Amino acid sequence: MPRTLEGDLIDRGGRYAIVVARFNDFITARLLDGALDTLRRHGVPDTAITVAWVPGAFELPIVCRRLVRAAEHDAIIALGAVIRGSTAHFDYVAGESAKGIAAAGGGDVPVIFGVLTTDTIEQSIERAGSKMGNKGGESALTAIEMVNLLRELPGAPPTKAR
Ligand code: INI
């Protein structure tokens, strides 16, 4: 039998930060609801959750980076909704947001990419709690799994009490 390392979905004392963009907040508020609901259902108390709002998806990376550096959380969840509509702005905002969030997650703290990038408002609505699920909830599950997996891996730093 190989040694298998896998994070489960049970809260094991993790501390979570959610960074959420206000732009398109009729969508992002639903993503936040989904993330909070999932964290709570998996046993994470509100005292272990921090929520930070930023103006738009473009501003998500700077706040994720700061939270990573502060080392007060075991995972950061970045939530946003970039909707193409008819503007070329989409490509810059979506691209820089994705690149910046990936860079913020390049260290020891996982940064989860929960940013919807869709062509239409309808596609975002579908992914914010209707027929295609809720990207916020899925991101929270990913965060719990990564926190627990990283604790199983060799070289894990001592767990901080919350
Ligand atoms: N921000 C978003 O989060 N979603 C969008 O769809 C969007 N569009 O399309 O423009 C958007 N723009 C704002 C951007 O994130 C910054 O807040 C702004 O450019 C100031 O830096």
Image (tube, rainbow, N blue to C red):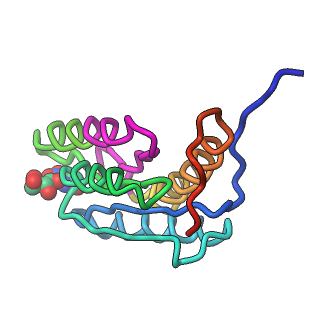
Residue at image location 19% in from the left, 50% down from the top: 58
**Please, is residue 144 above or below residue 129 in the view?**
above
Q: Position of residue 124 (x, y in %)?
A: 37, 54
In this picture, residue 5 sits left or right of residue 20: right
Is 103 contained in the magenta span?
yes
Q: Residue at x 65, y 48 (%)?
A: 148
Q: Residue 122 at what x, y percent from top left? A: 36, 55
Provide the residue span drawn in magenta. 98-124
Q: Which residue is drawn at 19% across and 48% down?
A: 85
Instruction: Determine if the magenta segment contains residue 41.
Output: no
Instruction: Please state the horizontal and vertical placement of residue 120, each as a whole percent of the image.
Output: 30, 49
Of residues 151 and 110, the one nearer the viewer is: 151
**Camera-side residue: 145 or 74?**
74
Quadrant location, ligand no. 1:
bottom left
Asked whether 60 or 75 is in front, the reply is 75
- The quarter of the picture where residue 39 lies is bottom right
Position of the C terminus by quadrant: bottom right
Residue at (40, 55) in percent of width and height: 71
